[in-house]
Image (spheres, rainbow, N blue to C red):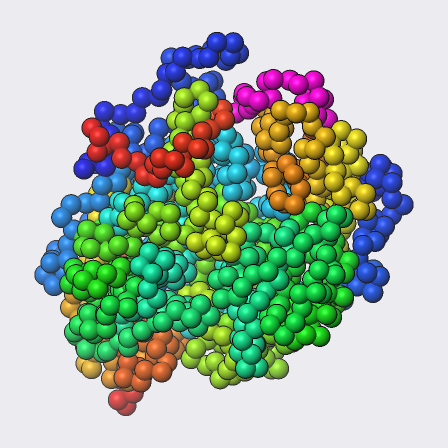
Amino acid sequence: MRYLPLTPADRSSMLETVGASSVDELFRDVPEAARLSGPIAGLPMHASEMAVERHLGKLAAKNLDAGSAPFFLGAGAYRHHVPASVDHLIQRGEFLTAYTPYQPEIAQGTLQVLFEFQTQVARMFGTDIANASMYDGSTACWEAILMAARVTRKGKAVLSGGLHPHYGEVVRTMAKFTRDEIVSLTPELSAQTDDAAVIAAIDETTSSVVVQYPDIMGRIPDLEAIAEAAHAAKALLIVVVTEPVALGLLEAPGHLGADVVVGEGQSLGVGLQFGGPYLGLFGCREKFVRQMPGRLCGETVDAEGKRGFVLTLSTREQHIRREKATSNICTNSGLCALAFSIHMSLLGGEGLEQLAAINHDRTQALVERLTQIPGVSLLSDAYFNEVTLVLPRDAREVVRELADKGILGGVSLGRLFPEQVDLHNGLLVTATETVTLEDIEEFAAGLAAVLEGEAA
Amino acid sequence: MSGVNTAGWRPSMNEVAPGDMVPATQSGDRALMLEEALIFELGCEGQTGVDIEPASKAVSPALAKFRRKAAPALPGLSEPEAVRHYTRLSRQNYGIDLGPFPLGSCTMKHNPRLNEKMARLPGFADVHPLQPQKTVEGALEVIEQLADWLMKLTGMASVAMSPKAGAHGELCGLLCIRAALDARGESREIVLVPESAHGTNPATAAFAGFKVQAIPATPEGRVDLEALKEKLGPDVAGVMITNPNTCGLFEPDLKEIADAVHEVGGYVYCDGANFNAIVGRVRPGDLGVDAMHINLHKTFSTPHGGGGPGAGPVVLSEALAPYAPLPFVTRGEDGEVRLVEEENRGEGHERAFGRMVAFHGQMGMFTRALAYILSHGADGLKQVSEDAVLNANYILRSLEDVLEAPFGKSGPCMHEALFSDAGLPEGISTLDIAKGLIDEGFHPMTVYFPLVVKGAMLIEPTETESKQGLDRFIASMRNLAQRAREQDESLHTAPHFAPRRRLDETRAARKPVLVWKGDEAA
């Protein structure tokens, strides 16, 4: 048991100090009936390092990883190249194995990174401020809706049809219990955006309007028009960004009238990881700061007058306000925020712009090639690195058949919107900088073959 | 706005206070401890640390009207600059790799690097949450195997894996209770929470739409059973109990509490943050618990990375199991592991209360926790809780003659030893002891928590400290207590040797500076 340093001699000498005859005696407050003597039944005994590696290695090998196949999935989780130095630096023990910086004098590393991270996110989003991260984009989205309700003292949220359906489901689930009213619009499979429907749903009782940018089908909503309608009704515009790389090319939501911008930061530094841990981003106007959920890091000075950083404004938080707190959230995604921040520092603004350009470039190449296939059409021509193709049949089967050929060919809208039959022929495809022209060729050939198989 | 301070950063060169033992240096640096500028101050406009292939096509005309006017105002660092910046920053941090991190109730134990290696296998790290099921069977098996361990270790019927952290798990558990009550057509509004609970407990109950009523603690540091029973009635949805509790004690009446709560139709939520003290020795299911979250980072040692990520799977009793949120991983009778989500919820999860996160939860943490669990095995995990409890009691008994242990007479503690500042002389506070400990080279214990004890010092050594290490820590604590008794004034100004002296937290809160704006002033 290589992680346990006590020797049998240590244990007996310590028991003597403690004044107990056996370790069982230390558990004497546990009712006798609930005390287990031997190891719990049905579970294996300890294993060597090599045995654990073999076991998990076998399980890992059962998966088709993105690097081993032409890969075109997005829908809220994106595959980007992560510079080697990012993963190296986050594995430094002082970062990796630190806890929440409760003692700022010996946690300036973590705290300065959080301060830099907050600034980076605020600048990327075009918001005044940002917090030190949330669990992920979907929970950040719900927290933003709650914050808007606190700020406006109204309780109705309008969710655009272009919002990631899992994000929508998280919001609807939570609202069932908090009794907030959610108007969740249905996306339509037409080239028009859902903007008009969103604007039509806003009324005086609306606290927030939630719009994804770019949306779940890869389209780009007109934020300025929606912001105007929301503000006229004294509601807040919440913009959800699931692909922050898009902000290398697209105008920052905060510059287009968004009051709150939340997002998923996984694209920068974090990796796919089968869905988590991810990184919730949360930025907003400065005047909402005391209603904001999550941790905040602030600048101050030490007793010698030197600049330093601390966690601050904790009077909003659960450990002080208990049931009156702005949120029950008690942690952040510190390590993922570190990875994001390092990756962002390596890129810089211009690097981000270049990264966005190459993503858009590869997606254009993908679209050009796939729309040459008979029966395949494009939903909307304004896209960043993700786009919806309309196929002649249910895309769920097509995705499975492509997987049989070793091609990970996008996400079917039928999986995302099982109840909306009119969307079932939609296939959401994404190309990032990791996609090569050979990958695109292989995908196109595979898709053509699968669709021809149908015709035959 | 350029995004960088082209004038470059200059360290502050403050006069050193008279009597200070550390002389000033021209640069502000102290030997290997270097002052570090912010990335925005490094004067690196136009710099980048990545080589990206150029785009071959222009931006499509349809996108042109959405384009930003200028690149985001963000500085770039060359790769060597970035490596140095973050390496230097890392040296201003204390982590468990450097020494003991005895934060009570936070549980910081050794983080094995094998777990990191396993989580980084491309089959786990480089798979997408929406890949076709057939291409991620191994990843689903990791979830299922971990779930199986968690159920067997807790004696529970089911486990919701997707909650992202302990507090998120609490919310999941309470929403399961809500859903079960809804299914019964009852709208019970009250959740009972002991005063000594984590602050997340009442916050979570409020977020799940319940009203919170506090239960006092007894003078022995346990839930007041009679006070609790008096509050029970048809409007009580449930209780939230932390066991072992935040005073470091086991709640011996949990089974009796559970029976009484069940009697009136309520449910029992157990805050499992301290499960590491009893893992392998006590199954909460045997004590009548209906829901309990498990902080994987605490009990199964996944690194916390300066504040997260955590992971908070929730084990559920048979009564609550049907309501667990989607997505859900299950092993069928045919032995095959399947994923249930909205598309196929009809396959046994019709009553799922919804979805709490976009994807499957903290997969990367699951892999790490499973690697840790397999390394220890059923026998090792039992040894883990025994050593954690032994180490805590060793600290309790080795310090109780110099520091007041308010519940020292209540019997053995579990995984953490609780002291108060009651025995310290006037003018010396818990904070002074904590900051003094920094100068001794240790991370301080948890201070001023739990609130039921004045000037609390909650020390949790965990099972990964050696006896020799504990003896060094005990010697430092005894020395600090001695200095306190001698009214050593220098304790008030500690730490003296950390990268920063005491920081002005009041100033940070009064005039919040949350983002760097240096270039706007220029």
Q: Is residue B246 left or right of residue A276?
A: right
Q: Look at the image and say whether residue A179 sits in the magenta stretch.
A: no
Q: Is residue A101 left or right of residue B249?
A: left
The answer to which quarter of the image holds residue B34 is: top left
Q: Position of residue B103 (x, y in %)?
A: 62, 41
Residue sitting at x 69%, y 47% = B247
Q: Position of residue A347 (x, y in %)?
A: 29, 43
Q: Is residue A413 visible?
A: yes
Question: Looking at the image, which is closer to me, B153 or B200?
Answer: B200
Residue A443 vertical position relative to residue A317 in the rendered view, above or below: below
Q: Residue furthest front?
A: B230
- What are the residue bounds of the magenta stretch? B478-499
- Name the image quarter holding the C terminus of chain B: top left
Residue sitting at x 70%, y 18% = B486
- Name the image quarter holding the N terminus of chain B: top left
Residue sitting at x 87%, y 48% = A22
